[in-house]
Image (cartoon, rainbow, N blue to C red):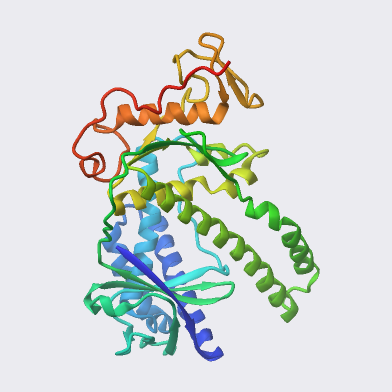
Amino acid sequence: MLVFEAKLEGAKEQYERLDEAIRTARFVRNSCLRYWMDNKGVGRYELSAYCAVLAQEFPWAKKLNSMARQASAERAWAAIARFYNNCKKTIPGKKGFPKFKKHKTRDSVEYKTSGWTLSEDRRTINFTDGFQAGRFKMWGTRDLHFYQLKQIKRVRVVRRADGYYVQFCIDQERREERELTGKTIGLDVGLNHFYTDSDGQTVENPRYLRKSERALKRLQRRFAKTQKGSKNREKARTRLGRKHLKVSRQRKDFAVKTALCVVRSNDLVAYEDLKVRNLVKNHNLAKSLSDAAWSTFRQWLEYFGKVFGVATVAVPPQYTSQNCSNCGENVPKSLSMRTHRCPHCGLVIDRDWNAAINILELGLRTVGHTGTHASGDIDLCLGGETPQGKSSRGKRKPHQ
């Protein structure tokens, strides 16, 4: 599934009608969630049928396209199903009980195959449901002429701090050809450096949020001093939201480009299977961990691994920093110790470099076996051969 995005250009009245559609979609989603709470045993199909009841009971809800109402019900069911799955898996802590959606800057409404039409040149979109938002010009770099209309399964209108965007979900698998490089790599993510690989190379942590904190605090103070309900408050909220949006875009852009570079340069990528949700519970490191965007980086690694046919392997993080990459002995060390010094073989090496080598070794042992987290075509990546023994990068001569 491909997702193409373009910015919408229209009049102020058109944006207001899009806001009405977004509010209605949120109302349908919250009403379905309340219906599930009040009626034990309600399932997905009952929620879909309940959309027709809402349309009859509330005339303004009927303005929203019927498939858009069903998509809102599906969103409610997605939250419910996620809660059920977490309960079945006996995940410790909170299970993610579904919550009602509130008004926020970033919100959306999703259409399916009706309620919208594209122009012949595929540069404008017309929303034809009861809200009659009308025709919008689309600004983007993606060309929709390469795909048939029947391949567009969803059209999502997203409201952000800097305007309105349309996303097209296209039923098309992405596959890219690449030449084999014969290289394998292990990655150890960190806060001092974004990651350190098994060759000892490092990528600096950009720290976009930390660099923008001063400006964000100033905008937050200005927003707090405005009067509630005033136009100045809306302007201040928009400026603050745009600054946060810029930081998030910078973080995502860095993660995507870095993941793409790593995948295209190697035939196998091994990384730690970190539980970032648990790590951010440490309030001393939560902001820095969120700013590093490890989860986003991992998601794009796995995505590009499937696109380019590269094996991506998530290995258990236990003892990767403590074990010696040369002799395998356990060398306990605290987080403040940044250098690995092995008393058994005499290896002196950077702590993260040592961990990256161990991660690569675990990845080479794991790939090709049942129950791994590997994604991508392993035969394509490794030329049909299963790695035997250790990589030539796995052993390092002791540094005296």
Q: Is residue 130 above or below residue 394?
A: below
| Point 31% across, 39% down: residue | 182
Observer able to see residue 236: yes
Image quarter of the N terminus: bottom left
Image quarter of the C terminus: top right
Across and down, in percent, residue 224 comes to 77, 66
Across and down, in percent, residue 80 comes to 38, 53
Q: Is residue 119 above or below residue 263?
A: below
| Point 72% across, 61% down: residue | 216
**How many numbered markers are drawn?**
0
Across and down, in percent, residue 396 comes to 46, 22
Across and down, in percent, residue 60 comes to 44, 83
| Point 33% across, 48% down: residue | 305
Left or right of 262 on screen, residue 311? left
Q: Which residue appears farthest toward the right when viewing the image? A: 225
Q: Quadrant location of residue 232?
A: bottom right
Q: Which residue appears farthest toward the top when viewing the image? A: 344
Q: Quadrant location of residue 337?
A: top right
| Point 49% across, 28% down: residue | 355
Q: In this view, does 329 lie above or below 249?
A: above
301 or 345, which lies in front?
345
Observer able to see residue 35: no
Left or right of 222 on screen, residue 10? left
Q: Which residue appears farthest toward the left when viewing the image? A: 384
Q: Is residue 172 above or below residue 90?
A: below
38 or 320, which lies in front?
320
